[in-house]
Every structure is written in C-alpha cells, then in structure tokens.
Image (cartoon, grey):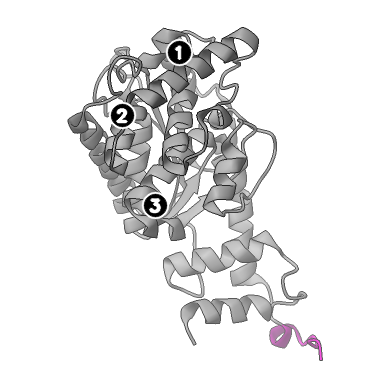
C-alpha cells in the first residue's frame, strides 16, 4: 500500500461518513503526501509579503500613484494592514520584503532589503526586467525561503504589494494560458469606465509587442520584481517539501510561472482562495485546482493565505486527533 493509500485509508476510517469533511479531507491527504507521513505537522507558519514598483504604472494602468507601494509597506511594518490583523489572529509570522520598491526605506525600518532595482521597467517601451534582473530576483526569493526552512518553517505563504501588479499578472496569465488578454484584465485597485478601457488598450498593445519563448523570458518580459521573487520562493519551498500557500491573483500568476518552470511544484501548492479579481477564477479552472475559500476578496497582501490557515490546521488536526471507528468503539457501515 502506498503512502497516499495509507493516508486515504486513515482518513476514511475516522468516525464520520467517507468524504464527510469535504475539502478538509483533500487537504489532509495533500499535506500528508507533501510531508511523506501519516502524522503531518505545521511548524512556524510564515508569510512573506514581497513589494515592488512597476514601470508600467507610469502609463496610468492603476488609479493609484506609485507612491502607494512604499506607503503601504510602511503600513505593513506599522502593523496597520489587513495582513497584519489576520497574521496576528492566526499566529503567523509576517515578514515584508523590498523586492524592488522605488523608495529608500529609513534605517531601522523592519523591511527585508532584497531590492534588485527601483522597480521594473515600463513594458510599453521595453521588457519589465532584464534576464539578469529576473534571475537575481528568483534567486533572492529562493534564499529567503531557504532561511525560513532552516529556521524550522514547513508552511509558507506569499503576499505582495505593488501598484500595477495586476496588469503584470494579467499579461502572464494571457501568455501562459493563451486566454485573450481582455478576459484576463480586472479592476485591480479600482479601474472602471474609461480608465479600464485605457488599461485594456495598453495591455493589449504590450501583449502584441513581445514574443518571449521560455517561462523565464516570459516572466522577465511581462512580470515584476515581486512576482519573480515569489516565483523563486515557491520553487524553493516546494523543493524543500514545504507547504506553499498561494494567495490571490498576483500570487497565482507567480504560481503559474513556477509551474511552467517546474510542474512538480503543484503537489505542494494549496490555492487559498478564489479572488474577486476578474480572471482569477478562470486561472484556477485552467489549473484544475479547487480553492479553499471564496470570500470575494481582491486585496492581495497574502490575506487569503492567512485566512485559510485555520482550515489547514483543522485538516491536520482531524487527521492526527480524530478517533477511528475502532478506537471509539463505533460500528462502521455494513
């Protein structure tokens, strides 16, 4: 009997009808498989929030100015954002990473300095990153996860902050899934009416300008520094047999990129929620994954990952602690 078969047998013999715990049973099977054990555990849960600016924001694809990126980072470190609230609530360690913010944070501000550049380039005129910048960002993401793994973390989530990053994510989705660009574009931080039409026209122009061939070239052309760093982080986490908590649309674009580089990382990914950002549900359908939550969120920051964490705890808890029919002296079905 394989480990997966043993896990499924253990799940089925709990004091409940087969399948009665629904998604929790799927999660328990996945987590046991990731950790290669019948008694999985969660250790030092952590969320890394990667922040970076986007040159394409200069074209007005977002109604918010680029300065909001660094201002929100300061809100994170002041513990005033939604991700701070949800991380505190669920005892998740939170770290904020400067992947490429166009701002110099004051000395002493608790931001991890992994800055590759002061934002990506304007894709309307040139690729978002050089191949070297993209490679460096991927490697820095790997190193940050390696540090967490070495400290005992075995479950890690990723969030992001970057004005313009829904545009980058829409372009990656369009390219990797061959879905018309118009179907990949959502409101982002609040694009509507004429502004949304302008955003769509610009992204269509950008999508037609380039023809990258490999996943890495596609990421460098259409991505962002925070997306590239998340991609590397997810690849490293999976290689270290960690549970990877994928947040919303932008994090899923990084996950999609990681899957194109190494399809095996899918085993380790838990897609935490279906974002209300247009395109995300279709992305999840294309990946054939069922998200843990569907709450109409479209905030980013890792909030969906933090909110899903208690349910992941519940999946591990019932697998390890719930009695079997034999243990409880309860008659199983005939």
**Sequence order check, earlier mark of 1 and 3:** 1
Q: Residues within 10 Å of mark 2 (few under 14, many from 20)?
A: many
**Sequence order check, earlier mark of 1 and 2:** 1
> Which numbered tag is attached to residue 71?
1
The residue tagged 3 is 153
Stretch of the chain drawn in magenta: 325-334
**Sequence order check, earlier mark of 3 and 2:** 3
Q: Position of residue 98 (x, y in %)?
A: 33, 25
Q: Position of residue 60 (x, y in %)?
A: 47, 9
Count of numbered circles on the image:
3
Main secondary structure found in the magenta portion: loop
Q: Secondary structure at mark 3?
A: loop
The question of residue 32 being in magenta is answered with: no
Choose mark 3 or mark 2, whichever is in front. 2
Name the one closer to the observer, 111 or 265: 265
Residue 238 versus residue 88 in the image, above or below: below
Q: Which residue is at 59% across, 71% downward?
A: 320
| Horizontal arrangement in the rendering, residue 49 relative to residue 320 (left or right) | left
Q: Residue furthest bottom?
A: 334
Q: Position of residue 39 (x, y in %)?
A: 51, 72
Q: How far, Cα to Cα, is label 1 from label 3?
A: 29 Å
Residue 253 versus residue 114 in the image, above or below: below
Q: Position of residue 226 (x, y in %)?
A: 36, 30
Q: Which residue is at 52% across, 10% downward?
A: 64
Q: Are marks 1 and 3 in contact (CB under 8 Å)?
A: no
| Horizontal arrangement in the rendering, residue 69 relative to residue 16 (left or right) | left
The residue tagged 2 is 221
Q: Secondary structure at mark 1?
A: helix
Q: Is residue 93 visible?
A: no
Q: Which residue is at 61% across, 64% downward?
A: 26
Q: Which residue is at 20% across, 32% downward?
A: 131
Q: Residues within 10 Å of mark 3 (few under 14, many from 20)?
A: many
């Amino acid at each position: 009997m394989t480990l997966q078969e043993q896990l499924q047998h253990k799940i089925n013999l709990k004091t409940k009808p087969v399948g009665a715990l629904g998604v929790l049973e799927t999660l328990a099977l996945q987590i046991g498989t990731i950790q290669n054990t019948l008694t999985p555990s969660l250790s030092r849960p952590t969320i890394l929030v990667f922040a970076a600016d986007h040159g394409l924001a200069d074209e007005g694809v977002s109604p918010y100015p680029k300065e909001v990126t660094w201002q929100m980072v300061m809100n994170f470190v002041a513990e005033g954002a939604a991700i701070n609230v949800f991380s505190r609530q669920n005892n998740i360690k939170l770290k904020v990473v400067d992947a490429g913010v166009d701002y110099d944070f004051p000395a002493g501000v608790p931001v991890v300095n992994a800055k590759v550049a002061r934002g990506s380039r304007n894709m309307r005129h040139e690729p978002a990153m050089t191949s070297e910048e993209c490679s460096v960002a991927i490697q820095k993401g790997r190193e940050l996860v390696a540090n967490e793994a070495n400290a005992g973390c075995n479950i890690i989530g990723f969030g992001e902050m970057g004005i313009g990053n829904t545009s980058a994510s829409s372009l990656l989705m369009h390219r990797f899934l061959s879905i018309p660009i118009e179907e990949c574009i959502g409101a982002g931080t609040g694009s509507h009416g004429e502004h949304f039409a302008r955003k769509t026209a610009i992204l269509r122009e950008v999508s037609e300008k380039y023809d990258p061939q490999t996943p890495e070239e596609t990421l460098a052309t259409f991505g962002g520094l925070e997306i590239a760093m998340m991609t590397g982080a997810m690849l490293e986490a999976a290689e270290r047999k960690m549970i990877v908590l994928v947040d919303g649309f932008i994090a899923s674009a990084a996950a999609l990129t990681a899957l194109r580089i190494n399809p095996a990382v899918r085993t380790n990914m838990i897609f935490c929620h279906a974002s209300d950002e247009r395109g995300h549900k279709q992305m999840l359908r294309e990946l054939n994954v069922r998200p843990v939550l569907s709450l109409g969120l479209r905030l980013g920051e890792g909030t969906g990952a933090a909110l899903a964490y208690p349910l992941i705890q519940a999946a591990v808890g019932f697998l390890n602690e719930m009695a079997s029919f034999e243990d409880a002296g309860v008659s199983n079905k005939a």
